[in-house]
Amino acid sequence: MAYTDSLSALSDPTRRKVFEAVATSPRSVSDLAQALPVSRPAVSQHLKVLSDAGLVQVKAQGTRRIYSLRAEGLRDLRAYLDQFWDAALAGFATEVQRLEGEGNDGPDYQDN
């Protein structure tokens, strides 16, 4: 799935809470509904969106369905976010080099 699907799925605050709970440990719909101020059907709908975005996976365990984080689903989202982190670090490195070229070691700290 594309990072846009992940961003869209995680844009809802309740859905983020569901995702964060599942990321902590695998859980059933009932477990999630007990921990959140939403109904079981609402939790199921949020899990469907997260599953469609590739962020969670489900495994049948008897009559229960257990949802867990799908690490592969975060790959595209992380790659998207990493490009901004890489650009920020490159900008920081450029600024440090510029300051060093001016003979500036950084801020002057004086003991008061």
Image: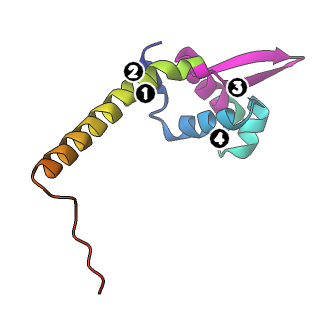
Residue 20 in which image quadrant: top right
Residue 96 seen: yes
Among the two numbered marks 4 and 1 on one chain, the one whose residue lies closer to the N terminus: 1
Q: Are marks 3 and 4 in contact (CB under 8 Å)?
A: no
Q: Are marks 2 and 1 in contact (CB under 8 Å)?
A: yes
Please provide the residue range marked out in magenta. 42-71
Identity of the amino acid at label 1? Leu
User: Which of the two discs, 4 and 2, sits closer to the camera?
Assistant: 2
Identity of the amino acid at label 3? Ser
Q: CA distance from mark 1 to mark 3?
A: 18 Å
Q: Are marks 3 and 2 in contact (CB under 8 Å)?
A: no
Secondary structure under tag 4 reads loop
Q: Residue at x 15, y 51 (%)?
A: 99
Q: Which mark is residue 41?
A: none
Q: CA distance from mark 2 to mark 1?
A: 5 Å
Residue 78 in which image quadrant: top left
The residue at which mark 3 appears reads as 68
Among the two numbered marks 4 and 2 on one chain, the one whose residue lies closer to the N terminus: 2
The residue at which mark 4 appears reads as 38
Label 4 packing within 10 angstroms: few (<14), some (14-19), many (20+): few
Left or right of 111: which side holds 108?
Answer: left
Secondary structure under tag 1 reads helix
The residue at which mark 1 appears reads as 7
Q: CA distance from mark 3 to mark 2?
A: 21 Å
Left or right of 7: which side holds 90?
Answer: left
Residue 48 seen: no
Label 3 packing within 10 angstroms: few (<14), some (14-19), many (20+): many
Q: Residue at x 56, y 16 (%)?
A: 54
As drawn, the residue found furthest toward the top would be 1
Q: Is residue 24 magenta?
A: no
Among the two numbered marks 1 and 3 on one chain, the one whose residue lies closer to the N terminus: 1
The residue at which mark 2 appears reads as 4
